[in-house]
Image: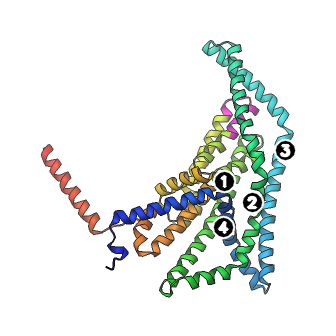
Amino acid sequence: MNTTFDNIPFYIKFSIFFVGILAFGFLSYIGQDIIMPIFFALLIAILLDPMVSFFQRLKLPRTVAITLALTVGILFLSGLIYFFMVQLSLFNESLPMFKEKFNIVLDQSKNWVSSEFNISMNAIDTQIDNWSKSLFEGTGAVIGYTVMTLTELIVVWLLIPVYAYLFLYYQKLFLGFIEQVSEKENQKTIKEVMTEGNKMIQSYLVGLVLEIIIMSVLNSVGLLILGIEYAILLGIIGALLNVIPYIGGVVSTALPMLVAIVTQDSFISPLLVLGVYLLIQFIDNNFIIPLVVASRVKINALVSIIVVLIFGAMFGISGMFIAIPLTAIVKIIFDRIEPMKPYGLLIGIEIPVNTKFINSFTERRKIKIKDEGKEIK
């Protein structure tokens, strides 16, 4: 009996697909310390591939071209880190004054709570001490684990440039392997998937970098206009945190508000900071992201939120970062495989029209509405 995949009932197809996704997610979760650096190295290799091609067009050997491209990338990243550390050192120099002002604001807050709610200062101090002890106890519990694993994590993540170099160097080897293991009738489809996925990742990463730069400028200018100290540092931190969906936006807004409370005498300053950041978030969500970032990936908002939450729960912040490009690649693959096209449709942003099912459903709904209207009359 010859049973093709098309003759298998839908619920069996969905069960196989769902079990496969769970198995892949479980294996990825177990091996995330190895898989995540490799995946980030692959993204970096894809991003640097046009630069490598440019250097090769200048008649440079491939090894030299890859080395130059990685060097440019490392120097660019080192420059950003150096600029960030300089700003951080300026903040560190003012830390004693910052701490002193924070204690003043804390004392004023305690006096206000004591007078407004008729709570003794001893009770407030006791409660604050309890919170501090529980915080430091919880922090101390994870310090040992952090110290034990820090060296291992540094070694693993420092291998990313090595992985990226090897991905670029053995690019033709990987392509030749894919060509030989794939059937001839599927080679055209596989080539389309790889080409489109490669372009999508490159444009997405470039768009993400542009968004960070634009947000850094907007945040810094807004804080400088308000006269908030450490404006450039807070603006850059806010732009970097903004890459993390949901949590990043809240934290990036809370930090300058806290600095405004401590460093400014007026309580209007943190409210002005909140207003400026809400305006910047509005510009980012409605103009920057749709034009610079979201236009690169064709994934609907519901799926984007779900995959970001899932990847964040499984892999942390790094998982949130790779969730969107990985889902976009999956959609490209689904769109090229006939049995998987419905799943690609579910992930995407294109809404189907004029299908038999939709037309039938719409007609039945219209009839039902008319009948309900007659009954009301």
Relative to 351, say whether 153 is above or below. above
Query: Where does the image place residue 239, in percent across and percent down from the top left?
Result: 68, 51
Identify residue type, mark 1.
Met
For the record, the magenta segment spans 255-269
Residue toward you, 210 or 217: 210
Q: Is residue 209 visible?
A: no
The dot on residue 43 is 4
For label 2, the residue is 156
Residue at image coords 35%, 74%: 6
Work out how far the residue at label 3 is from the one at label 4, CA to CA, in angstroms.
34 Å
Compared with residue 116, is residue 66 higher up or lower down, i.e. above or below? below
> How far apart in space, not on screen, are marks 1 and 4 (Cα)?
23 Å
Quarter the N terminus occupies: bottom left
First in sequence, mark 2 or 4: give its number.
Answer: 4
Q: Earlier in the sequence, mark 3 or mark 4?
A: 4
Circle 2/circle 1 CB separation < 8 Å: no
Label 3: state its secondary structure. helix
| Residue that label 3 marks | 90
- For label 1, the residue is 215
